[in-house]
Image (cartoon, helix red, strand yellow):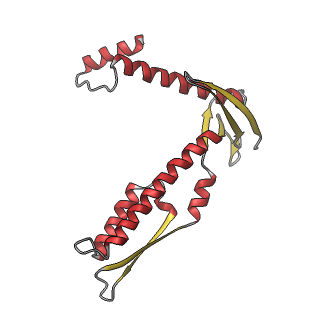
Amino acid sequence: MKSEVLFCIQQLSAETAEKYEVRIWRLADEEDGVERKEVRLCMHSDANELAECCMLSRVRESLEKDLRHLHEGLSVPRRMKRYDKVLQEIGRLRQKHRRVSVQYEIEVTTDEKQKNAVQVTWTCNQWQAQRDANTGVYPLRTSKMKWDEEKVVRLYWTFSEVEATFRSLKLELGLRPVYHRTLARFRDCESIAKLV
């Protein structure tokens, strides 16, 4: 059952009042014939989509810059050229940029002796389009079966605001980060945080 609900949430901050348009839909209430004891929602926000697209494009640019640097280094003296070392470096780059590395097919061409790399090429594959189609969408779950979609989303936003407020208060009081080594000091810090 996919019923889409569209509504606006008024988000007030100290500087500006912003409106976020949010589309939510309920996922199937049963899976493989077994009824769930929770409500699962998907929520899409244009503001979150924009932020996530910006983050992903920055990571993609960083990966492509590192791959270009690796490729250009193959023709520069005293830079990494051995085939196994180049593959190892590509593995490190994939690890460093793991959010987008699955979206790239990276190939290394070797010389006649199969010892040195002479070229590094990369292309985007179909994962990028699929990944980009899901930007701005994130799941919400609740055990409150009778709540409608809008109430669940508004409660989620309220929790986010409360958590941000507590983070701010703890920072102002100097309670973050917590570096306590003994249990007694940790309990003291915890009791002060509860008062906040």
Q: Is residue 35 above or below residue 168?
A: below
Q: Position of residue 177 (x, y in %)?
A: 32, 27
Of residue 24 and residue 82, the one placed in the foreground of this image is 82
109 horizontally vs 37: left or right: left
Q: Nearer the viewer, residue 184 or 195?
A: 195
Position of the C terminus by quadrant: top left
Q: Residue at x 38, y 62 (%)?
A: 66
Q: Is residue 136 left or right of residue 165?
A: right
| Rendered location of residue 62, percent (x, y) | 42, 56
Q: Position of residue 23 (x, y in %)?
A: 71, 39
Instruction: Residue 127: name its quadrant.
Output: bottom right
- The picture quadrant where one finds residue 24 is top right
Query: Can see residue 144?
Result: no
Residue 131 in the image: above or below residue 188: below
Task: Give coordinates of residue 136: x percent, y percent.
Answer: 61, 44
Residue at 60%, 28% (x, y): give it. 157
Q: Is residue 98 above or below residue 9?
A: below
Q: Is residue 125 visible?
A: yes
Is residue 52 positioned above or below 159 on the image? below
Residue at point 59%, 65% (across, down): 126
